[in-house]
Every structure is written in structure tokens, then in C-alpha cells.
Image (cartoon, grey):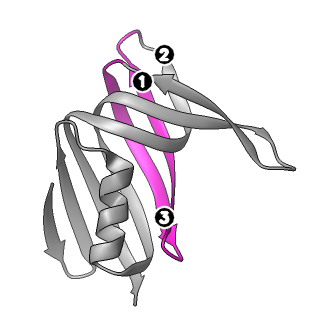
Amino acid sequence: MEIEEKSNLLIVYLKKDEDIFLQLTEITRIYRLIKARITGFGYLNRLEYGILSTVEPLFLTKNLIEDFITVSSINGMIYNKDTNLMINSVDKQKQIHLGRFISGLVADSFTIFLNIIETE
């Protein structure tokens, strides 16, 4: 993982086999983030995401894809140190995968932008 700092913006470059959610958790800890807007794009070889099944109680149907996946966008935020992300992606069979991001392993490269709103 490489991080560039530009004023209130962090640009994170992830490398092969890095877990996106674990890296974001580490960045939240290191930079003591409370609120931040997250956007990004890249390639994955493993994706776990959820689709809303019920509201009361909140329940997501989990999906696991272990294939090459192109992520056109990942959007979300860190709020009170809690990370929530939504993903838009497509696999090599051209099936679209949309939902709440749970975890993912980088296939080749992945770039994440964090617009920092509040720190400790």
C-alpha cells in the first residue's frame, strides 16, 4: 500500500492480494479518521458483497465472487470510525455485481480516494 497526502485528500494505491477493508481499517487507525468520503476503482480477484433482504432487522444476503472483477466505482464513507461502502462492478462473464461491499482482494491494482472531513 502506498499513500499520497494532498491537503485533506489521501490517495491510496493498493497492490496485489491486499484486502481493501483491512487496509481502510488500518488507514482509519493511523490517520485517526472520524469522518471521510471514500471513492475508488480498480480490479479484484475476490469480492464479497451483500444485497438488502430485510429492513427489520437489517439483513444482507451475501454473495461471494472468486473471479477477475472490474470495479467501476466504490463509494461510501467513514462515519464515527465505521466504514460503509457500496460497490458497482462487473466480472469477466459480464455479470453486474452491485451492493454493500463486505471484503475484496486486489487482483492487480486498486486506487482509493479519501476526502477527510474530520479527525480526532
* Magenta span of residues: 67-93
Mark found first going from the N terminus, 3 or 2 = 3
Circle 1 packing at 10 Å, graded few (<14), some (14-19), many (20+), is some
The amino acid on which the numbered mark 2 sits, given as a three-letter code, is Gln
Q: Residue at x 24, y 43 (%)?
A: 18
Q: Is residue 74 above or below residue 93?
A: below
Quick one: SS at disc 3? Answer: strand
Numbered tag placed on residue 95 in the rendering: 2
Q: Is residue 36 above or below residue 44?
A: below
Q: Residue at x 47, y 36 (%)?
A: 88
The amino acid on which the numbered mark 1 sits, given as a three-letter code, is Val
Instruction: Please say if the residues under marks 1 and 2 sit with CB atoms less than 8 Å apart.
Output: yes
Label 3, on which residue? 77
Q: Residue at x 36, y 71 (%)?
A: 28
Cα distance in 3D space between marks 3 and 1: 22 Å
In percent of width and height, residue 15 lies at 15, 43
